[in-house]
Amino acid sequence: MAATQTRTATQTSTLTKVVYVTRKVQADLFALVETYGQVTEGYAEKLIHDLRILLDEEVVERIRFVWTTPGTNVVVGAYSYTVLGGGVGLADDRSGGIGYSALLHQSEFKVRVDYNPRWYGLNDAGRAAVMKDFKLTWGPGGTLDYSRGRFEADRTYSKDGYGLGRERFAGY
């Protein structure tokens, strides 16, 4: 018995735009790898690959690189990238500006993805079709405690009306 499956998406972005924008996120991630050494360059490459798939399939609204106090859910630092679509004239900043913090160096690094309604509207077969080419295994994450700081707008990475707005978590 043969099965066929069809997946539809409202393609408001092209892979070219996603690759351009995620190259800047990749530069940020490699700076974090060099600065803190908490993940390998190989892991970072696989992560960017998977994030490009999620962004191209338009199923994610936010990506966060998060540091927590070891053994807890208390956030002490983070970079958040929120999808910005349909924004004519979005700024396109240079990547970078990743500073060193001894607190982050001693903390646990995590990656979180917030899915959008399109993801939750997919059936199991649709989600499997998106995930079939992932290089990493993704699972549910627990609740994080952001009460000891706030996010501040930092940079915008964009191309032709599609982009990611970067925010930095600043502790109190």
Image (cartoon, rainbow, N blue to C red):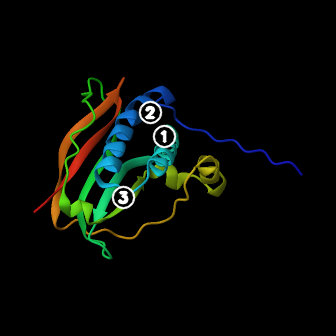
Mark 1, Cα crowd under 10 Å, few <14 / some 14-19 / many 20+, is some
Q: Secondary structure at mark 1?
A: helix
- N-term-proximal mark, 2 vs 3: 2
10 Å crowding of disc 3: few (<14), some (14-19), many (20+): some
Q: Farthest bottom residue?
A: 71
Q: Position of residue 77 (x, y in %)?
A: 23, 59
Of label 3 and label 1, which has the lower sequence position? 3
Which marked residue is nearer to the observer: mark 2 or mark 3? 3
* Location of residue 28 by image quarter: top left
Comparing 72 with 151, the one in front is: 72
Q: Is residue 150 above or below residue 89?
A: below
Residues at marks 2 and 1, CA–CA distance in whole angstroms: 6 Å
Check disc 3 and report the residue beneath it: 38
Question: Which residue is disc 1 drawn over?
Answer: 52
Q: Estimate the x, y position of residue 113 in percent, counting from the top left.
A: 41, 54
Q: Amino acid at mark 1?
A: Arg
Residues 59 and 100: in front is 100
Q: Is residue 165 left or right of residue 38?
A: left
Q: Which residue is mark 2?
A: 18
